[in-house]
Image (cartoon, rainbow, N blue to C red):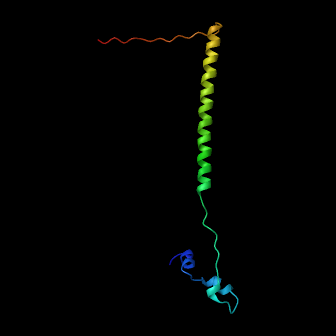
Amino acid sequence: MQLPEDQMRAGHIPADLYRQLPQGTDLRRVVIVQHAPRSYKGPIVLTLVVLTGSVALLLVIAFVVQVVAGAAIGVLSATGGLTYTINRKHLSSK
């Protein structure tokens, strides 16, 4: 038994608690109440939700920027304010 929790489960009363009991206390009727161990499930789930939401938000922003840029180029090229060409060179094999 290395840990105090092991001692409690085995029914042993640690010395510091034993000194706090009043004289004449029946040790068979002593109940020691401990806090439950901390659960990390909530913070882990919250972190995953925040990360997933952040990634989704960045993807939506990237999509909106792409659509706005495409619309802006379409409007500018239709009004004559901007022209662009795409050159595709065919490479011939020698």
**What is the residue that sits farthest to the top in this orientation?**
80
Q: Is residue 5 above or below residue 21?
A: above
Please count the marks in the image. 0
Q: Residue at x 66, y 7 (%)?
A: 79
Quarter holding the C terminus is top left
Name the one closer to the observer, 82 or 49.
49
Q: Is residue 22 above or below residue 43?
A: below
**What is the residue that sits farthest to the front in this orientation?**
29
Q: Residue at x 53, y 76 (%)?
A: 6
Quarter residue 82 falls in: top right
Residue 84 position within the rendered picture, expressed as x and y whole percent measured from the top left? 56, 11
Name the one closer to the observer, 30 or 93.
30
Residue 58 position within the rendered picture, expressed as x and y whole percent measured from the top left? 61, 34
**What is the residue that sits farthest to the left in this orientation?**
94
Q: Residue at x 62, y 50 (%)?
A: 46
Q: Is residue 61 above or below residue 31?
A: above
Residue 19 position within the rendered picture, expressed as x and y whole percent measured from the top left? 66, 87
Q: Residue at x 42, y 11 (%)?
A: 89
**What is the residue that sits farthest to the right in this orientation?**
22
Residue 15 position within the rendered picture, expressed as x and y whole percent measured from the top left? 61, 84
Quarter residue 68 falls in: top right
Name the one closer to the observer, 19 or 94.
19
Quarter residue 61 falls in: top right
